[in-house]
C-alpha cells in the first residue's frame, strides 16, 4: 500500500551478480565488518551465513544502560508490538521485543527486494523494450514487453511519475523511420515474459482500484495508471491491451488501420526499434522513497528471470533469497510471497530487518543506493509528514522505510541518535491498528532517538 497519506488512513539461489557479489564478499573476507570496523573472524567463518535469529547481537548490554522507552513501547495503539534496536558498532541488541519472530513486514520488504535487484542485476541494469517486424509480412509488428512498467505515453516535454522514463513516442519515431512508406496492418502484443498469474491471490483488489498496485504484466505503460503523472491513480485489468492502444496512437497515420492482438512472438522476427529504461538504481530509489508497489514487483520478477527462474510469483521466495546471499544473513526463516510487501503472508523478523539495515548504513556493495532512497523523517517521501510536533527533535534523524497493510504498520532503518551513536532498528505493530498507530510508532522511535546508546531493554 502507499503510505503517508492521511486521507487514505484505512487503505494506504545460479549467479548472484558476480561482480558486485565478489566485491561485497571481498570486503568481508578482507577483514571489513559491516559496521566498518576490523574483524578477527576467519574467512571460513565469515563464509558461513549467520542465522538471522541467532546473531552476535545480544539483549545484554556491555555496560549499564538506564534510558527507558517502556512507556512508549506499552502504548496500546501499537497492538501486537515487536521490535529490535541494535548498536551496529558493537552488535548489541539494545532493545528486544519478540524480535526473532517473523511477521508481515509490509512495505519494509521493499528494502530486501531492492537489495536483491542491486546484487543480481546491478545498479546500471536497464530494461530494453523492443519492436520487431515480420520479414515475410512487413505490415505486421510485434511490441514485446521486457518488464518495464515505466515505459510512458506522456508527450515530449512532459514527465510521468517515473522521471525521464522511456517514451512510446520515441519508440514510434524509430519504428516509422524503419518502416518508411510501409503501413501497419497488425500490431501483436507479446507480454509472455513473466510466467503465472498477473495478480497475487492474497492481495486485495482494492489496491488496484484505489491506485496502489497494477497487474504484473511484462508489457505495461506508466504502471497502467489512468493518470501517468499521479503516483496514486486507478489501474485497470487490461494493461497489455492499454499499452497496445497507446502504441498505435503513437505510431500515428502509419498504423491508423492496424488491428491489435495479443500473442507470443514467433522466431525469426527482425528487430527494428527499442528504447531503454532508466538504470535500476533509479527504480530502487524511487520505489523506496514513495513505496511504489509496481516497481517493487517488476524488480522482483527481473531478479527471478536473471537467476534462471520463470518470473512468477511462486519463484520469488527462492529468487529474492538467492539475491540476499551476499548479506551473509540467513534467509532460512524468511517467507516471501511478493516483492512489494502487500501480502499478509510475507514473513520477516524485526531482527533480520535491523541487521539488514546495518548493511545499508555501511553502504556495503551497492547498498548505498538503498540508503539514498530511504525516506527521511519530516523531510522526504513517505516520512515527509511524520515526526513533527512533539517528535520534531527527531526530524531528519530517522532514515527508514515505512510499511502499511490493513492489519499492520511497520518502520525499519537507521536512527542517527541524539548522542551521536548510529542505531539500526525495526518496529512492527500488528492487529487492531489504525492511522494513530503511526504516531505511536513515531513516539517510540523518537524515544529511542533520545536515549541513543543509553537505551535500556527494560
Image (tube, helix red, strand yellow):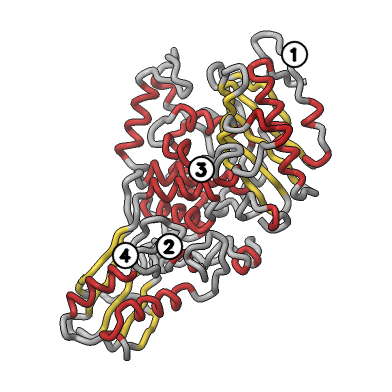
Q: Residue at x 52, y 28 (%)?
A: 358
Q: Residue at x 54, y 50 (%)?
A: 290
Answer few, some or many: residues within 10 Å of disc 3's Cα (few below 14, many 20 plus, some between 14 and 19).
many
Say if mark 4 contacts mark 3, CB within 8 Å.
Answer: no
In percent of the image, x 47 and y 66: which residue is there? 228
Is label 3 in a helix, a strand or a loop? helix
- Front tag of 4 and 3: 4
The answer to whether 225 is drawn above or below residue 434 in the figure is below
The alpha-carbon separation of the residues under discs 1 and 2 comes to 50 Å
Q: Is residue 8 above or below residue 386?
A: below
Res 48 visible: yes
N-terminal of the two: label 4 or label 1? 1
Q: How many marks?
A: 4
Whichever of labels 1 and 3 marks the residue nearer the N terminus, that label is 1
C-alpha distance separating marks 1 and 3: 33 Å
Q: Left or right: where does residue 174 sit relative to residue 154?
A: left
Residue 104 x/y as whole percent: 65, 46
Callout 1 crowding tier (Cα within 10 Å): few <14, some 14–19, many ≥20: few
Residue that badge 3 annotates:
112
The residue pinned by badge 2 equals 149
Percent x, y of residue 356: 53, 33
Q: Which residue is mark 1?
A: 66
N-term mark: 4 or 3? 3
Residue 162: percent from left, percent from top: 43, 57
Distance between mark 4 and mark 2 Cα atoms: 10 Å
Q: CA distance from mark 2 to mark 3?
A: 20 Å
| Residues at discs 1 and 2 in contact (Cβ within 8 Å) | no
Q: What residue is pinned by disc 4? A: 129
| Image height of 220 relative to 282, above or below | below
Amino acid at each position: 500500500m502507499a503510505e503517508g497519506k492521511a486521507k487514505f488512513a484505512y487503505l494506504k539461489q545460479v549467479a548472484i551478480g558476480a561482480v558486485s557479489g565478489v566485491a561485497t564478499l571481498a570486503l568481508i573476507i578482507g577483514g571489513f565488518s559491516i559496521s566498518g570496523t576490523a574483524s578477527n573472524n576467519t574467512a571460513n567463518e565469515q563464509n558461513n551465513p549467520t542465522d538471522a535469529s541467532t546473531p552476535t547481537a545480544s539483549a545484554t548490554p556491555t555496560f549499564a544502560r538506564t534510558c527507558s522507552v517502556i512507556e512508549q513501547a506499552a502504548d496500546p495503539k501499537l497492538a501486537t508490538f515487536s521490535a529490535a534496536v541494535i548498536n551496529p558498532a558493537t552488535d548489541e541488541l539494545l532493545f528486544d521485543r519478540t524480535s526473532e519472530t517473523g511477521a508481515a513486514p509490509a512495505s519494509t520488504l521493499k528494502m530486501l527486494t531492492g537489495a536483491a535487484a542491486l546484487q543480481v542485476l546491478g545498479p546500471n541494469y536497464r530494461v530494453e523494450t523492443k519492436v520487431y517486424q515480420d520479414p515475410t509480412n512487413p505490415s505486421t509488428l510485434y511490441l514485446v514487453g521486457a518488464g518495464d512498467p515505466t515505459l510512458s505515453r506522456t508527450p515530449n516535454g512532459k514527465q510521468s511519475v517515473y522521471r525521464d522514463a522511456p517514451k512510446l513516442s520515441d519508440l514510434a519515431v524509430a519504428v516509422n523511420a524503419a518502416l518508411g512508406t510501409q503501413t501497419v496492418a497488425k500490431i501483436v502484443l507479446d507480454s509472455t515474459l513473466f510466467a503465472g498469474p498477473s495478480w497475487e491471490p492474497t492481495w486485495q483488489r482494492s489496491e488496484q482500484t484505489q491506485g496502489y498496485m497494477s497487474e504484473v504484466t511484462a508489457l505495461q505503460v506508466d504502471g497502467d495508471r489512468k493518470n501517468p503523472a499521479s503516483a496514486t491513480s486507478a489501474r485497470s485489468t487490461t494493461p497489455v491491451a492499454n499499452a497496445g492502444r497507446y502504441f498505435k496512437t503513437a505510431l500515428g497515420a502509419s498504423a491508423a488501420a492496424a488491428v491489435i492482438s495479443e500473442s507470443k512472438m514467433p522466431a525469426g522476427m527482425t528487430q527494428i526499434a527499442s528504447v531503454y529504461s532508466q538504470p535500476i538504481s533509479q527504480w530502487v530509489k524511487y520505489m523506496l522513497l514513495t513505496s511504489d508497489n509496481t516497481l517493487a514487483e517488476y524488480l522482483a520478477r527481473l531478479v527471478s528471470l536473471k537467476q534462471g527462474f520463470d518470473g512468477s510469483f511462486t519463484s520469488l521466495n527462492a529468487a529474492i533469497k538467492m539475491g540476499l546471499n551476499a548479506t551473509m544473513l540467513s534467509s532460512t526463516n524468511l517467507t516471501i510471497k511478493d516483492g512489494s510487501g502487500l501480502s499478509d503472508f510475507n514473513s520477516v523478523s524485526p531482527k533480520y530487518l535491523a541487521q539488514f539495515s546495518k548493511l545499508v548504513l555501511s553502504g556495503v556493495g551497492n547498498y548505498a543506493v538503498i540508503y539514498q532512497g530511504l525516506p527521511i523523517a519530516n523531510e522526504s517521501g513517505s516520512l515527509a509528514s511524520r515526526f513533527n510536533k512533539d517528535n520534531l527533535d527527531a526530524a531528519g534523524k530517522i532514515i527508514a522505510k515505512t510499511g502499511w497493510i490493513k492489519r499492520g504498520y511497520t518502520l525499519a532503518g537507521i536512527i542517527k541518535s541524539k548522542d551521536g551513536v548510529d542505531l539500526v532498528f525495526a518496529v512492527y505493530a500488528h492487529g487492531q491498528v489504525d492511522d494513530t498507530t503511526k504516531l505511536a510508532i513515531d513516539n517510540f522511535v523518537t524515544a529511542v532517538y533520545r536515549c541513543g546508546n543509553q537505551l535500556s531493554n527494560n
